[in-house]
Image: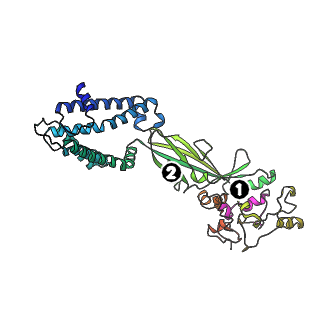
Amino acid sequence: MIQVYIEYWKQYFNWSGRTTRKSFWWVFIMNLAIALTLILLYIVTTGAAVVLSFDFEGFNVATYIFGSLLILWSLATLIPTSNLGIRRVRDTGLSPWIWLLSPVSSILGGFNNFPAEIVSDILFLAFLGLALMPSKKGRISSRSQSQGSLIIAIGLIALVGFSVVNLPAKAEHIVQGLPQTNLVIKTNSDAKISLSGLTSESKQEVISAYKENGWKLSESGENLIKQIYSDNQQFVIDNQTYQTDVNGKVIAKVTSNIVTNITASDSASAPTIRSNIEGKNSDSVKIRTPFAKTKTVIVNQTIDVNEVVNQMDMVNGNSMPEDVSPQNQDTSTIKLTPLSFNLLSNGVVRKYRVGEKVGCNDFNAFGTDNIHHNKADPRFWIDFMGSDCQNVVTNIPLYLATCKKDSTKNPFCKLNSGACSTIQKMPRTYHHMSIFGGVAK
């Protein structure tokens, strides 16, 4: 047996001649035993669960060694095994072209199609059946070497070419056959207003007004919090983009027991939104999905209303002067513009009229006094609640689709005065909101 196997390697490039039935099957059994041994060592060194799930992070040095040996072994035996098959077919007295049943069988087996796989198995068994036939004496053509090399070339080129083209589909088929977990991303979104900077009396005034509209006071007593919509947000899971549904959820199928990358792509590009994924203050995390039917990932998001308002004021610039009258402001902290300086000097409060051009309707709520107050004045936050701007800011999908651009080179509000109103189909100019949410008549 050993001598037969040595002869198999010596005839690496021998496409002529014959191979007896006994020699063929001894080599077949030896190659099969070596391949199975390498596969067994490959699995044992890491564990069947890790190998079958393609969890590369769980591989150790021995796994890579035996895996590499298995690949090298398969490549090294490709040509001599093909030659062995041609010589065996020729020894049976049949045409060596029949050997092409072998690569055709391999090609059909790679189609990930049940009928094709059945035909592949039939062809492979047919070839093995031919290899069981006894030797038949006959004259060997003088062109057997060149003929054999041509047959091998045709078969291997077709096999390698198909394997390369079919590689992505094969990889996808393998992944689909691995254990799957339903990865559920559940978003909890809040809007936050910081009350720092307001006096105790002013805080109570703002808190009372907001509590009547569903806002809650944080444990620290420094922030107002309200749960808001979070549908249509984008999440990237292993390079695939998903959107949250009306319940703020994403459901994606991922391979079990591997490291999965999750990124809140929208909030990552909006500095006014803070994300916490699985307890980590980050817009992107890596988690290992378990061997379970479902894995739920909690994403808590908070939109900082103060930052959004400040950002829009910066974008609108001098088009939105604030109330800087002496009775309301500490003038030492005011950033003066020519218009605000004039207002301050004369103690005049700027009032807007309905229909007047405005940079942002962030103070047109029901009961407004038509003054764009400074953020340190509780009246600003009272006029803000129920304004066009507040309705956008406390709707994360709407905010992400529009106003987040203000932190980019193509700002939204700066290019569209009254932008918050426009996207809600409200008048772009200054107007009053009714207590029922529409434009006051």
* Residue in front for this viewpoint, 409 or 208: 409
Q: State the residue at coordinates (42%, 38%).
A: 53
Can I make out residue 26 in this image?
yes
| Circle 1 residues within 10 Å: few <14, some 14–19, many ≥20 | many
Residue under the image location 39 percent in, 37 percent down: 52
Q: Residue 413 appears in which quarter of the rendering? A: bottom right
Residue 373 falls inside the magenta stretch:
yes
> Farthest front residue?
142
Q: Which kind of residue does numbered mark 1 sit on?
A: Tyr
Q: Which mark is residue 210?
A: 1
Residues rendered magenta in the picture: 367-391
Where in the figure is residue 219, as x and y percent of width and height?
A: 70, 44
The quarter of the rendered structure image containing the C terminus is: bottom right
* Residue 231: x %, y % from top left: 55, 56
Q: Which mark is residue 250?
A: 2
Q: Residue furthest top?
A: 2
Q: Outermost residue toward the left?
A: 137
Which of 94 and 316 lies nearest the eye of the viewer? 94
**Which of the marked residues, 1 or 2, is nearer the chain's N terminus?**
1
What kind of element bears circle 1?
helix
- As drawn, 66 above or below 245: above
